[in-house]
Amino acid sequence: MAQALVVLDDLEQLAAEAARWLEKAIDTRIRRTGSCSIALSGGSTPRPVYNRLALSPRIAWEKVHIYFGDERCVPPGDPSSNYRMAQEALLKSIRVPPAQVHRIRGEHPDPETAARDYDAMVPEQLDLILLGVGADGHTASIFPNSIPSFDPSRRAVHTTSPLPPRDRISITPRVIEAADALLVLASGADKAQAVAMARKTETDPVQVPARLALRGTWLIDRDASRLVSA
C-alpha cells in the first residue's frame, strides 16, 4: 500500500475511514495468505476505530494474530494499559482465539525481562502496524532521542517515557521498517507540529520518531493537518 496522506474533517470521520482501511487490509491479507498479523496502537485516537472494527462482519478474526506496538509497565487492568483499552473497545467483542492475542506483560516486575520475552514473540515481519503520533513526535513508545540506545538486533525493548508511567515496552524501528503496511493516525491541534515535522524530508527520525512510518498511509484530522505543507 503506497504512501498517502488523507485529511478528514474530524475524529469521527477519521475513525470511520481508519476502520474501513483496516477492514479491507485485514480481509485482503487473509484472502491472499490465509492469516493476518497486526500490531495495535494505544492512546485515545484508536479507541473509536476499535469500536467500529468490533462490529465488522467482514473480518475472519479467527485467522488474525494480534500484537501491540507498545505497552505501559502496569497491570493489564490498569486504566493506562493499552491492552485494557483494546480489550474494552475490541477484543471482548470479537472471536479471536485467546492464544492469538499476544499481550506484552507490562505487569512483570522486571521490564527488561518482559521486553526480551516480547522480543521473542514478535515476528520478523508483521503484516500491519497501526501507529499514532505523540505531540512530541513519538510513535509507539519510541521517544525523541531514544533510538540510539536501542539494540538494532531487537524487535522489542524496555524504554522510558518523559511522562508517567515512565517504564514502557515498545517495538523498535526494525519492526516498523519491516512491516508490510503501516497505518498512522493523528488527531488534534496538539499533534500539528509533530505531524508537520515528521513529513519534512530533512527531519531526523531520531528527533521525530514518527518519521519512521512516513511510507505508510496517514489519516489525520484537519486540526492535526494545519501546519502540513500542501
Image (cartoon, rainbow, N blue to C red):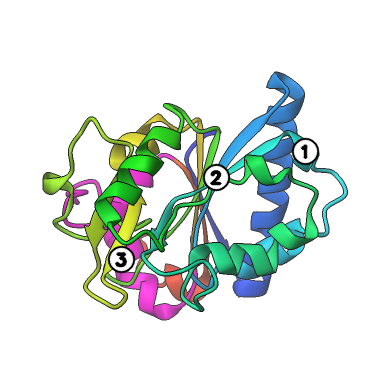
Q: Amino acid at mark 1?
A: Glu
Spatial separation of the CA atoms under disc 2 and disc 1: 14 Å
Seen at 67% across and 47% down, the residue is 21
Q: Quadrant of the C terminus?
A: bottom left
Counting other residues with Cα less than 10 Å from the Cα at mark 2, is it few (<14), some (14-19), or many (20 or more)?
some
Q: Nearer the viewer, residue 72 or 203?
A: 72
Counting from the top left corner in percent of width and height, residue 102 is at: 55, 45
Q: Which residues are magenta?
A: 186-215
Q: Nearer the viewer, mark 3 or mark 1?
A: 1
Whether 129 is drawn above or below 223: the answer is above
Counting other residues with Cα less than 10 Å from the Cα at mark 3, is it few (<14), some (14-19), or many (20 or more)?
many
Image-based side of 4 in relation to 13, left or right: left
Q: Which mark is residue 194?
A: 3
Whether 143 is drawn above or below 166: the answer is above
Marks 3,1: beta carbons within 8 A = no
- Does the segment drawn in magenta span residue 164? no
Q: Amino acid at mark 2?
A: His
Residue under pointer 1: 62
Image-based side of 53 in relation to 161, left or right: right
Which callout, 3 or 1, points at the residue further toward the start of the chain? 1
Identify the image quadrant of residue 90: bottom right
